[in-house]
Image: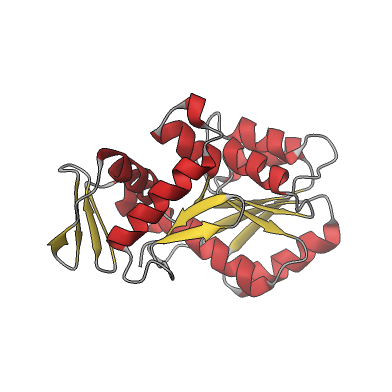
Amino acid sequence: MSGEKARILIVDDEEALRRYLRTILRGQHYAVSEAASGGEALERAASDGPNVIILDLGLPDLDGVEVIRRLREWSVTPIVVLSVRDQESDKITALDSGANDYLTKPFSAGELLARLRVALRPVAQPVVEAAHLAVGDLKIDFAERRVTMAGEPVRLTPTEYDLLRLLARNAGRVMTHQRLLREVWGEMYEGETHLLRVNISNLRQKIEPDPSRPVYIITEPAIGYRFRAID
């Protein structure tokens, strides 16, 4: 971010956890602000202009999912959920509502910092909004709808290309099964996870150096997929 400290907003009603997070983040030279409720979080997000929001779902006034929805009415700031809720349904709801990532408590400081670095990359490197994207040997020309691997053209079906494009445009972000199905095939296909798995498998056969150990399209078990963040 051109030498400027990234600004992190911590939203959690547990003061001890906020203190712990504050220590970790300031130790990594992040600028930190805090909120203990959903209402305060919305105010802070508007006034402080954070680069990433770390959000607990169990807040005293508003459920965290509602906070996400309200933020997404006007903000594209990356949101990393940090919650004790570990059910797949909770994760899917938060991600479909607009969260970028989801970590369950307890968590490791190293994993949280890694997720924050991924969340910050679109801010630092807005190449995912450009006409081209290059990750390793994989190159995507969005203007020409052309994909190459190590300089060799990759032949994709229109559906495979649309799926790759959606994942790549959201590099580093967890994309749920439902969202991928809805945006690529349409709302009536939201429950057709087998269709999605087949197309992901076909896509991996064409772009992954070793489809059994994918490095570009990463599986988030029971949730969805994540396209490898930009190098």
Residue 162's spot in the image, x, y percent?
32, 40
Q: What residue is at 64 percent from the left and 43 percent from the top?
A: 92
Q: Which sits in the foreground, 53 or 111? A: 111
Query: Seen from this angle, which residue lies furthest top?
Result: 188
The correct choice, above or below, for 144 with respect to 6 in the image is: above
The answer to whether residue 170 shows anywhere in this view is: no
Hey, which quadrant is residue 209 in on the image?
bottom left
Residue 123's spot in the image, x, y percent?
42, 53
Residue 149's spot in the image, x, y percent?
21, 64
The answer to whether residue 82 shows anywhere in this view is: yes
Instruction: Left or right? Give the position of 134 relative to 103.
Output: left
The correct choice, above or below, for 71 with respect to 91 in the image is: above
Q: What residue is at 58 percent from the left and 73 percent from the top?
A: 28
The correct choice, above or below, for 192 with respect to 206 in the image is: above
Residue 13's spot in the image, x, y percent?
82, 50
Instruction: Left or right? Give the position of 208 relative to 64.
Output: left
Q: Which sits in the foreground, 167 or 98? A: 167
Q: What residue is at 84 percent from the left and 55 percent from the top?
A: 14
Q: Which sits in the foreground, 135 or 69? A: 135
Q: What residue is at 70 percent from the left and 48 percent from the top?
A: 88
Looking at the image, how many numbered discs can be counted on the residues? 0
Hey, which quadrant is residue 33 in on the image?
bottom right
Q: Quadrant of the C terminus?
A: bottom left
Name the colouring of the figure.
secondary structure
Q: Quadrant of the N terminus?
A: bottom left
Hey, which quadrant is residue 220 in on the image?
bottom right
